[in-house]
Amino acid sequence: MSVRAHNYDYPVDTSSETAAAKVIRFVGFNKRVLEIGCGPGSITKILHGQKQCLVTGVELDPDAIQLVTPYCDRVVRADLNNADWSALSANLGQYETIVVADVLEHLYDPWKILSSLKTLLLEGGEVVISLPHVGHAAIAACLLSGDFDYRDWGLLDRTHIRFFGLKNIDYLFTQAGFKVIKVDFVITPPEETEFALIWASLNPDVQKVLRGPAHSDIYQVVIKAIPVEAQGTAISISESISQNSGSLKRPVTLRARITALLSSRQKTFIRSCMKTPM
């Protein structure tokens, strides 16, 4: 019997600049990995296959569990929003790397969950985490337009219940007893996001102001962190931005420029013909 496609099942080009590819590169080879919220296995299958990692998955959705099981040593069904997580996590064992890719924003208490992961790390272990960035210029455009509408995917995925700016991400790790030792960013201009139509409706002068801050094109943040007591030099997200400020802006593509010139009616017609977001 074939298994239906899953909303979070997507291909990953490991050489790309996507969050998933950056997470995989942060993990490396031959690790004992705990993947929290592994979903249907988009990252898992590459860690298992190309990276030769031994992966234990933690997932709630039974359809996703069915898809990810072939790539895992074992899969534990768990609801991280349930009070039973503490007791369940005590029996998971310990790992060299814990992956939490685009998961914490779905949790009622991400601070508590992140803190609980310290006991699941072997000595010298690390966590690799990706988070969406609510400070993106396109989100500011949505707020200015009065159109903060949830969607099936992206920065405003309708299952997101927590939102983080860059300072909030720093605080999240500090409060949980971790220090950030490496960080990378997924850079996406607002013209190339799922909010391109809202962005295009703004006055160019307003767009210029919203894109002023160095962090305005940061779509996702990928972090490697270790327990605060472990050997390693801590860095802050703000320091990483100052060090990489020249690479945090991507030139507007020709497609984005053309999109900005089209009327809303023309964009709607083109999208209906293509049946894909612009």
Image: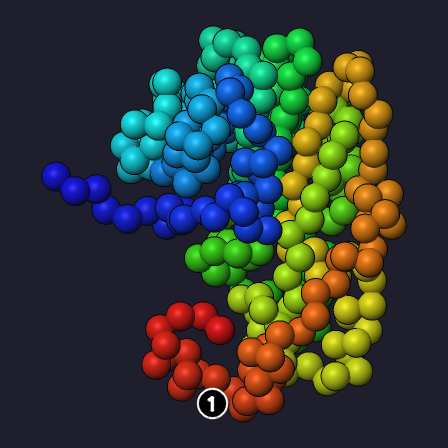
Viewer-closest of 76 and 129: 129
Looking at the picture, how far across and down is residue 263, in whole percent?
A: 54, 90
Give left or right: position of 142 versus 65: right
The vertical placement of 105 against 54, above or below, is: below
The vertical placement of 162 against 58, above or below, is: below
Q: Which coloring applies here? A: rainbow
The vertical placement of 194 against 269, above or below, is: above
The vertical placement of 124 against 16, above or below, is: above
Corner quadrant of residue 189: bottom right
Q: Residue at x 87, y 50 (%)?
A: 242
| Amino acid beneath label 1 | Arg
Corner quadrant of residue 114: top right
Quarter of the picture holding the N terminus = top left
Q: Residue at x 55, y 15 (%)?
A: 95
Q: Is residue 82 visible?
A: no
Q: How many marks?
A: 1
Q: Is residue 252 visible?
A: yes
Q: Residue at x 61, y 20 (%)?
A: 117
Secondary element at image label 1: helix
Q: Residue at x 58, y 36 (%)?
A: 25
Looking at the picture, how far across and down is residue 251, in whole percent?
A: 70, 70
Q: Which residue is mark 1?
A: 265
Corner quadrant of residue 69: top left
Looking at the picture, how far across and down is residue 59, in whole percent?
A: 41, 30
Looking at the picture, how far across and down is residue 105, in whole percent?
A: 58, 42
Viewer-closest of 154 and 160: 154
Q: Residues within 10 Å of mark 1 (few under 14, many from 20)?
A: few
Give left or right: position of 103 versus 132: left
